[in-house]
Amino acid sequence: MSRIPFRPLGGFFGPDRADARLSLAALAFSAITSVVAGLTLASQQDELRALPGLLLFVPPAIGLRGNVFGPLGSRLSTAIQTGQFAWSWRIDSLLGQNLVAVTVTSLAAGLGLAGAAEVLALVIDAEGGVIPIGVSDFIVVSIIGGLLASVVVLAATLVLTTASVRFDWDLDNVTAPMVTATGDLITLPALVLSTVLLRRGDLTVVLSAICAIVTIVSLGLVVRSGLALAKRIVFESLPVLLVAGVLSLFAGVAVERFESVLSWELLVLLPGYLGTAGALGGILANRLSTRVHLGLIEASLIPRGAARTDMGITVGLAMPIFFLLALVAEGAAYVANQSSPGTLLIVAVSVTGGLVATLFALAIAYYGTLVVVRFGFDPDNVGIPMVTASLDVVGALTLVGAVLVWGAGA
């Protein structure tokens, strides 16, 4: 009698198991490294409280890196698979124009988010009689902290592109989780580092003015240039990035409002939880975008064919990754000698909340892609920001909801 081979991935994912393994490995790396951001957030509670309003800026700051560089990876993936990609650093080349576009959009979106964060902080903190940090502080932490993080995330994206060409990887399967992992690793520490420049009187004001002028001039130069691809990316991406950032700010409001029910361990879990939900949605958005460009997906109310397969793979990836996230947070609490609600409770919170967020990601990625294509926009430019911004809010709410349902609060 012939034996039936054990196929833990192949049995569920079928012919897509190679892609699933690649995504699972990238997501696992993202989950494990997210503990760095979580530990930074948990260890900096007192410092963040001393700068009122800054905590609500954490989710959009982390999300912005993924929302800028995730689409970069998606565009490069499409270029590789359609035979348009070449390693040319000329400013008018495909790669050069993409680099110009991500630099300008990162600066412009950071400036816009700083203004939005100040307005929201004034509204929120005014209710409690607290005066938040000023708009100059937000601009400095957003632009300078963001640039420090962007250099690292950009380098990681280009390394991934090199590896995908060298090893014949599908960049769609690794960009979102690896960019998320890099963003988690570097963004929060970069923001914390940049806080040394806050509330420094005239120095902070001058730095913020320089940041604003450089951003506006850079945006103007791109608009007036002959770089058609860069202009299209900026025009299509920037409005979505700003909307995505504002939505992420509301995730920050949820975190700030419910901080009292989040234990040390749940604060460690938070960045990885939000990042994983966004990465799962980003993988799906990337795959759907590439399939749209290749003509492999037809618009239909009920997902069919390749789209349904990709959505099934996303659900299949969610459970083990959210389970791993819970174990990582529990391990961090044990090593740091911090109290824990219990392993089973943490697993229940992470897995149930994560699965709800993943189901939401399926709907946003699929129907959002169809709408974007219907209006003539490139889904590579707007797919990831659209998904991850929505999941920042939904992720924060599902985590808090799961904590309350399971009684795992502080």
Image (tube, helix red, strand yellow):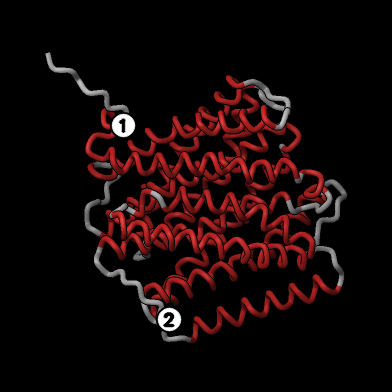
Q: Would residue 394 be visible to someone looking at this image? A: no
Say the numbered circle drawn on residue 9: 1
The secondary element bearing badge 2 is classed as: loop
Looking at the rendered image, the quarter that the N terminus falls into is top left
Q: Quadrant of residue 393?
A: top right
- Identity of the residue drawn at 76% across and 46% down: 44
Q: Would residue 212 be visible to someone looking at this image? A: yes
- Identity of the residue drawn at 46% across and 86% down: 225
- Identity of the residue drawn at 49% across and 53% down: 179
State whether residue 264 is above or below residue 78. Answer: above
Three-letter amino acid code of the residue under disc 1 = Leu
Q: Nearer the viewer, residue 376 or 147?
A: 147
State whether residue 247 is above or below residue 362. Answer: below
Distance (Cα) linking label 2 and label 1:
43 Å
Outermost residue, top direction?
1
Q: Give how far across and how far down residue 119 sits, in percent.
A: 73, 60
Is disc 2 surrounded by few (<14), some (14 to 19) or many (20+) residues within 10 Å? Answer: some
Q: Give how far across and how far down residue 364 sits, in percent.
A: 43, 46
Going from the N terminus, do you reach mark 2 or mark 1 first? 1
State whether residue 93 is above or below residue 340. Answer: below
- Identity of the residue drawn at 27% across and 54% down: 291
